[in-house]
Amino acid sequence: EKKIIIAIDGYSSTGKSTVAKQLAKALEYIYVDTGAMYRAVSLFAMQNGLINESHFDKEALEEKLPEINIKFVLNSETGIAETFLNDKNVERDIRSLTVSRYVSKVAAFSSVRKKLVEQQKQMGINRGIVMDGRDIGTIVFPDAELKVFMTATAKDRAERRYLELKEKGEDVSYEDVLKNVVNRDHIDSTRKDSPLRQAEDAIKIDNSNLTLQEQFDQLLELATDTI
Ligand code: C5P
């Protein structure tokens, strides 16, 4: 049986990572959440005072890029890979709305993309990988055997993200979450370097009216047909 690369791209909070994780588990593939990597770099920039509401010191971040080490480590209890920034578990911190506010600015910076895309390509060298993000089918793995582009209405997406953050105990308002989702989509789609767009050979899935199970079934069928 051949091993393939599955690229899952799409707008913010479309549930890419949920279905990508399920798919990787079913196929016994590696799962990589590239958004977590951009989030970790953003957290680093925040912690080092390189970004705030009015200022982003790109030069300083560029200089410090070699000091940033991002890893995924499997939590043996949950079976879920967690994000580590310079050997510290940041899985929880990178999901905050504060990080979400800065991440698209940081991700638009070419030097950051260059570093992370390089690492992502390495991760897929033996194939057998499900990777989700914004530019996986277009830039990271243009030769992926299966490319999926996920969409849903902004309202559906913000609702899901809002419930997720609430569940984690974050004190956020629905309006702020919606604003953030719309704003990130705008920055991600209009940036110069590898903007978010559907690859020509990607299959579009609008999951506004799909249950998680239906969505998973669709994707698993696509994957097994491809393998
Ligand atoms: O997937 P997630 O919503 O966690 O990604 C956070 C942000 O990271 C996105 O809004 C986008 O700005 C950036 N990103 C990116 N390219 C990727 C994955 C994420 O630019 N491949």
Image: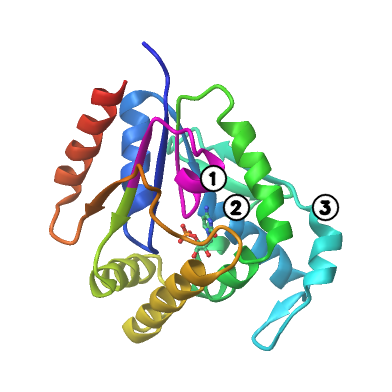
Quick one: SS at disc 2? helix
Q: Is residue 62 left or right of residue 226?
A: right
Distance from Cα at disc 3 to Cα at disc 1: 20 Å
Q: Which residue is mark 3?
A: 67
Residue 106, given in percent of the width and then of the height, sits at: 64, 68
Quick one: SS at disc 1? strand
Residue 17 vs 104, above or below: the answer is: above
Q: Which residue is mark 1?
A: 82
Residue 207 image-quadrant placement: bottom left
Residue 219 image-quadrant placement: top left
- Label 1: few (<14), some (14–19) or many (≥20) C-alpha neighbours in 10 Å: some
Question: The magenta stretch spans which residues?
Answer: 130-148
| Residue 37, disc | 2
Mark 3 touching mark 1, by CB under 8 A?
A: no
- Label 3: few (<14), some (14–19) or many (≥20) C-alpha neighbours in 10 Å: few
Question: Which residue: 78% across, 76% down?
Answer: 57
Q: Is residue 65 left or right of residue 42?
A: right
